[in-house]
């Protein structure tokens, strides 16, 4: 008899253990699914912002595990909903059942519509980001091509410092529809036209005010090679201009001076040469203002 009592007692003690594990509710699944989706989005951002293999590998591994877990949770939630619906449908009449199923179908259609809209929205954002990246890369390549063409032509036309000539004219350069590089200038009627960069550069270096940019022995437009005659200046500006340029440079705000110094460091040019570019622009702006005051 005592053995039987002991067995009954043991059985009574085990029963609550079986009832303690309640089946997850809809809210339980929703919280877990939402939390996982948030984690997945964060991991995707981390993965897209790093290119180091040793950092990227554990992120991708964790991302894969989270996506698998999310897929399992979504299947479990769908199964829970299916069972719940079966229980509901058992208690309904045929008319009520059809009405209920119609409502569920409408809800499913709305959910699918929302998912499609979100998917298209994300896809559109991805495509826009790719397009922007392509445009930025195209602009970079066009700028590099424009600089190469300018340096080549400036050297051929006998410029003292082709890099500085490029800095002087780069704001005029634009890409053409044919993939070539042009200078955007006004014609005699005041209309903007696209002029081949070599032709524009030839005209630019032939102007009297720019004669100091070209070695005296070089024939601009004739394809002559700079002679490098003895005694020829090695800078783009004369001593008098040097003093004027540096005076102009020192009169600039400290922020502007810092910008010129930074540009000189990046381009490898002396500060005087970069300052000369801004000096010429300033001088031309002043001349333009004086002409329009008359």
Image (cartoon, rainbow, N blue to C red):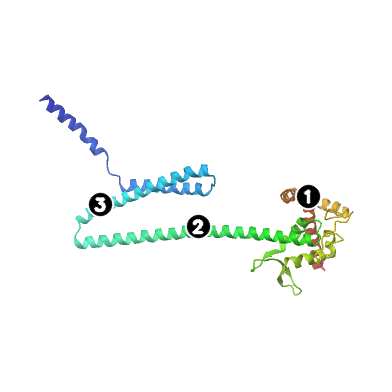
Label 2 vs label 3: CA separation?
38 Å
Q: Residue at x 29, y 59 (%)?
A: 104
Gap in Å between the C-alphas at discs 3 and 1? 78 Å
| Viewport quadrant of the C terminus | bottom right
Q: Give x and y (percent) for residue 128.
A: 53, 60
Position of 43 with respect to 270 (left or right) is left
Name the side, left or right, on which 17 lies relative to 119.
left
Residue at 36% of width from left, 58% of height from top? Answer: 111
For the N terminus, the image quarter is top left
Tell me the number on the disc at residue 271: 1
Question: Is residue 127 shown above or below 192?
Answer: above
The disc at residue 83 is 3
How far across and how far down the image is residue 19, in percent?
23, 39
Disc 1, SS? helix
Residue at x 83% of width, y 62% of height:
210
* Quarter of image, res 100: bottom left
- The answer to which image quadrant residue 285 occupies is bottom right
Circles 1, 2 touching at the beta carbon (< 8 Å): no
- Mark-to-mark CA distance, 1 and 2: 42 Å
> According to the image, label 2 marks what residue?
126
Within 10 Å of disc 3 (Cα), the crowding (few <14, some 14-19, many 20+) is few
Q: Which mark is residue 182?
A: none
Residue extending furthest top?
A: 2
Q: Seen in the image, is 88 located left or right of residue 240?
A: left
């Amino acid at each position: 008899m005592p053995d039987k009592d002991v067995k009954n007692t043991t059985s009574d003690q085990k029963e609550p253990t079986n009832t303690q594990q309640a089946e997850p509710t809809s809210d339980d699944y929703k919280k877990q699914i939402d939390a996982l989706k948030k984690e997945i989005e964060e991991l995707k951002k981390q993965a897209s912002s790093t290119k180091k293999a040793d950092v990227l590998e554990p992120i991708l591994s964790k991302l894969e595990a989270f996506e698998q877990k999310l897929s399992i949770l979504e299947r479990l939630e769908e199964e829970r909903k299916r069972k719940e619906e079966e229980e509901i449908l058992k208690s309904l009449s045929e008319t009520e059942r059809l009405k209920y199923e119609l409502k569920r179908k409408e809800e499913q259609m709305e959910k699918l519509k929302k998912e499609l809209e979100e998917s298209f929205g994300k896809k559109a954002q991805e495509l826009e980001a790719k397009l922007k990246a392509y445009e930025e890369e195209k602009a970079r390549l066009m700028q590099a091509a424009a600089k190469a063409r300018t340096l080549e032509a400036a050297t051929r036309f006998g410029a003292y410092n082709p890099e500085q000539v490029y800095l002087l004219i780069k704001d005029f350069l634009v890409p053409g529809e044919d993939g070539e590089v042009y200078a955007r200038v006004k014609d005699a009627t005041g209309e903007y036209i696209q002029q081949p960069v070599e032709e524009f550069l030839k005209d630019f270096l032939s102007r009297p005010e720019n004669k100091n940019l070209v070695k005296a022995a070089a024939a601009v437009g004739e394809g002559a090679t700079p002679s490098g005659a003895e005694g020829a200046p090695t800078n783009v500006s004369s001593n008098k201009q040097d003093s004027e340029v540096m005076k102009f440079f020192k009169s600039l705000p400290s922020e502007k001076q810092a910008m010129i110094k930074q540009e000189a460091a990046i381009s490898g040019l002396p500060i005087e040469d970069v300052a000369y570019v801004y000096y010429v622009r300033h001088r031309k702006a002043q001349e333009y203002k004086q002409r329009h005051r008359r």
